[in-house]
Image (cartoon, rainbow, N blue to C red):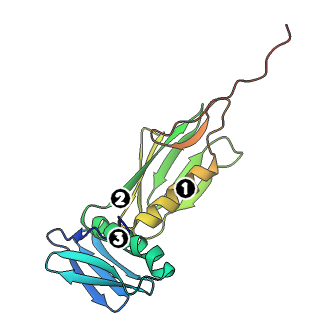
Amino acid sequence: MSRIGKRPIILPNKVTIDIKGQYVTVKGPKGSLERELPSKVQLNKDGETLLVQRQDESRISRERHGLCRTLVANMVHGVSAGFEKRLSIQGVGYRAQAKGSNLTLNVGYSKPVEITMPSGISVVVENNTSVIISGIDKEIVGNIAAKIRAVRPPEPYKGKGIRYLNEFVVRKAGKSGKK
């Protein structure tokens, strides 16, 4: 039995869930999320808890058991508390600027890089070098953070670039001079 899959999901107050076959809709104070779960897995509501159960003991259902539990738990957490990713920009002259739903990055290229945020995702820039991406869908927040980081990933020699907050970049030694 999957260790993750057998744990129940506790529904917080003000969060409602609607299950129609494999289609799940979760509504809460921050918004609404919906997803179609893979086959071979069932979602059962028992009062204020949700249980994810497999239909049989086949390999596919065992693989999807923990996955479906995590997906639904992330949906419940997203509509109640939300998710956020923090990025740090390091480098001389590197900075970010948020205008509405657009993020402008000046990270050493000849022109600034414009990134448009999808609906439901908000971006906040603090002191020009700290970017906070927040939203209710963990998958979209993570993908947007990865796209922003991919504009200028941290390089190993000087450490310049965009990195996740508290990300450790292994530094390499540069060229050694002649003796």
Which is more toward the observer, 33 or 50? 50
Quadrant location, the C terminus: top right
Q: Secondary structure at mark 3?
A: loop
Disc 1 to disc 2: CB gap under 8 Å: no
Q: Is residue 159 left or right of 134 when viewed as pictured?
A: right
Q: Secondary structure at mark 1?
A: helix
Which is more toward the observer, 21 or 97? 21
The mark that comes first in sequence, 1 or 3, is 3
The mark that comes first in sequence, 2 or 3, is 3
Q: Which residue is mark 1?
A: 146
Image quadrant where residue 169 sits: top right
Q: Is residue 117 left or right of 157 when viewed as pictured?
A: left
Amino acid type at mark 1: Ala
Amino acid type at mark 3: Gly
Q: Which residue is mark 3?
A: 5
Q: Residue at x 35, y 64 (%)?
A: 3
- The local crowd at label 3, few if under 14, some if 14 to 19, many if 20 or more residues have their Cα within 10 Å, is many
Quadrant location, the N terminus: bottom left
Q: Which residue is mark 2?
A: 83
